Amino acid sequence: MIDYLKGLFSKDMWSRMINIAQKEVKACLRNGWVIAIFSIFVLLSVFVSYFGAAVGNGDWGGYEQTIVYLVAYMEYMGAVLGIVLGFGAVVQEREDGSLELLMSYPLDRGEVIGGKFLGLWAVLSLCVAGGLAVGGVVIAFTVEHMIWSEYYLFILSSVLMGGVFLSLSLLCSTYFTSNNSSMAGSVFFFFLFNILWLFLMYFVAELSFGWDALTTDKPTPTWYFALQLINPVVVWYSLLATNLTALRDYMAIELGGTRAAEHPEFYQTWGLLALLVIWIAVPLLLAEYIINKKAL
């Protein structure tokens, strides 16, 4: 792994990984579903803006309602897209025998993992960033007070969050020996971070200091907020909640007063962005370690 990290500064290594990435991008584009996913993100942005908070009222929703609902949808759609792209990236080629053929070329196994991630992440970025950007242009013509700086951050963080689940699904695809097992492992991460974590943290809070401390004037221990950062989805949501005015106001109004919208001082934008990058890098390094240890 140390040699692999040193190789990241090698021009030849990056050239080989980019070649693999291009192969992945071309394979995805040939399927045609990339255009469909791209269109879904565009339509989602426009649909949410149109209906706003009251479905069927026939008016274009405001910027605040649009952002809140887009965040709610992206929490799941970005993760699902990352899983769909990554869970079969390695294990499917192992089952087909094409991975062994690929390894017959003068390539390091870590370069294969890195190249596949770069290619699939490029596809994910095209779908998420491209779709939301086109949708954002449409929204800008229909809502008042469009805050582009916040919308750009929303797009960037969503691409990173999708990259986290792509990285986790690539780890599963490297570790497991069948498509079904890889999908099951990837889905487990999805349910763990999007659903089960909420109940786990509720249980921890209730036993430690009482759940009402999060919505009242009772002090909430700093360690609780630090523990939340283990979950990449919480990192992503906290990043948006500390920077998006609309989401912060929504939390204050809907989730129990101003206390629910507060975050500790160490929840800084660049620190939270760095955590998302770390969440992408660590599973990739583990995947590289595993593929070097396993027989093809």
Image (cartoon, grey):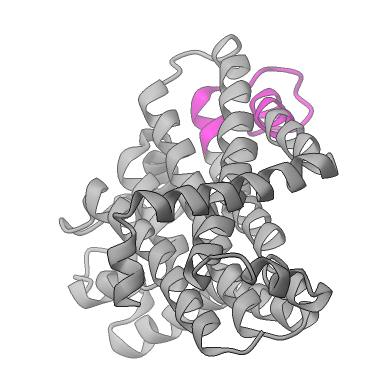
In magenta segment, residue 65: yes
Start-end of magenta stretch: 43-67
Q: Is residue 256 visible?
A: no
Quarter of the image containing the C terminus? Answer: bottom right
Percent x, y of residue 81: 67, 54
Percent x, y of residue 207: 36, 90
Quarter of the image containing the N terminus? Answer: bottom left
Between residue 205 and residue 36, name the one nearer to us: 36
- Identify which residue is drawn at 30% across, 46% down: 242
Between residue 190 and residue 226, name the one nearer to us: 190
In magenta segment, residue 4: no
For residue 201, above or below residue 62? below
Q: Residue furthest top?
A: 141
For residue 158, above or below residue 266? above
Q: Residue 95 appears in which quarter of the rendering?
A: bottom right
Q: How many marks?
A: 0
Name the side, left or right, on which 257 lies relative to 68: left
Q: Residue 244 appears in which quarter of the rendering?
A: top left
Name the side, left or right, on which 122 lies relative to 183: left
Percent x, y of residue 17: 51, 54
Percent x, y of residue 56: 79, 28
- Identify which residue is drawn at 54% across, 14% down: 140
Name the side, left or right, on which 235 lies relative to 142: left
